[in-house]
Amino acid sequence: MSDGGSIEDLLEGTTICLCVGSGGVGKTTTSAAIAAGMAARGKRVAVLTIDPAKRLADSLGLDELANAETRVDPGLFEAAGVDTGGGELWATMLDAKATFDEMVARYAPDAETEERILANRIYKEISGALAGSQEYMAMEKLYEIHERGEYDLLVLDTPPSRNALDFLDAPQRLVQFIEGRSLRLFLRPAGIGARIAGGASSAVFSVLRRLTGLDLMQDLSEFFAATSGMIGGFRERAERVSSLLGAEGTRFMIVTGPGGPAVEEAVFLREKLSEGDLPLGGVVVNRVHAGGGSAGHDEAKAALGAQLKDAELVEAILAADDAANALAVRDEAAIADLLERIGRSPLLRVPEMTDEVHDLAGLLQLGPYLFGD
């Protein structure tokens, strides 16, 4: 049952779809199903994920996903009985460190500087720390692919919403880091980076060099000298990436479940999107339980008893039916609460599936719930 039409309608005129939500609500599956469904409708689509479990690669029939897009075998659509009409599905898994390295290559003034930075121990530590917060690198990769203009739609499977603030604010935080007082002190011609070798500090580094074999002073000096000319490029790029979040053609889809904590996360995300004036396409509620019907126990018991001739089995079936109805009532109450708290946003229900989605055919079977087929 769908209250919000179809994903195709909700994403009309959209070139970027960002699926956001807490962990464990089927966000990766939903992202892949949206991408597969749009590809089945003749679009050239790429889906990006940072899911460390690599479930997306398995469901798309890929041995693995790389930091570059890989096309899903068109034969898998044919095997599922789907004619894409020229549509294509591509997928990539974010490699945050590789994405950061690509940024260095883009803004380094020459190949020698690039090599010096990538080999520098200080850069490796800093890039690892920044890339460890995958939110910005996910946006950076999305921006890079979007700029190439090769796809009708990009679908991003974002980090769990416990990092929602980090994800939405990541570009600005990178600008703040670049423009931060401590970094400027290092980069000024007469700053700490230029003076650190003098005085008592040189004796400390000398001892460290003898104990560890690492020339920390040289690494620091080379790092700041090599990166000083790239700061403007990083700042400009971060601002462009940030603007992409609210650009025309970008839509956010909140993915949630009917459970209490998931609903709270969805409400939190809706508030953050509103605060940032970021466009919401709709809400997908996964794993919604369906009731077993409204037939009275007496009638159902009599009908089942006549067919099964087993009183214990009949009681077990009726108990399971009661449990299903209770879950369905709970889920509908949670969805009503969600809609009341976030406003009458377009909402799509996806039922609890009996089998786990593990291949492209399974993703396409979600079509009736996401696309209203």
Image (spheres, grey):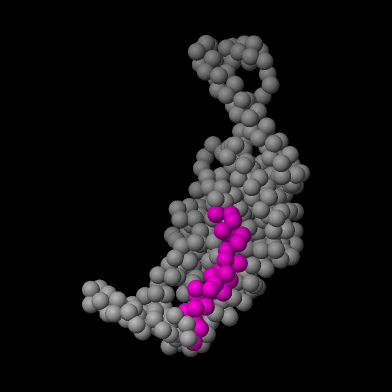
Main SS, magenta residues: helix
Vertical order, 371 against 75 (above or below): above
Percent across and percent down for residue 259 are 59, 37
Return the x and y of residue 107 as percentages of the image width and height.
53, 82
Q: On screen, 60 above or below 209?
A: above
> Residue 179 in magenta?
yes
Q: Classify the position of the N terminus by image quarter.
A: top right
Which region is colored magenta? 163-189
Which residue shows up at 53% across the image and 59% down it?
49
Q: Position of residue 16 (x, y in %)?
A: 66, 62
Going by the image, does 88 lie left or right of 357?
Answer: right
Give the residue drawn at x 59%, y 15%: 304
Q: Magenta stretch: residue 274 in it?
A: no
In the displayed image of the protein, which residue is found farthest to the front?
Answer: 199
Q: Residue at x 58, y 54 (%)?
A: 164
**Residue 79 visible:** no
Q: Residue at x 44, y 65 (%)?
A: 129
Residue 224 vs residue 259, the one in the foreground: 224
Q: Is residue 22 above or below residue 299?
A: below
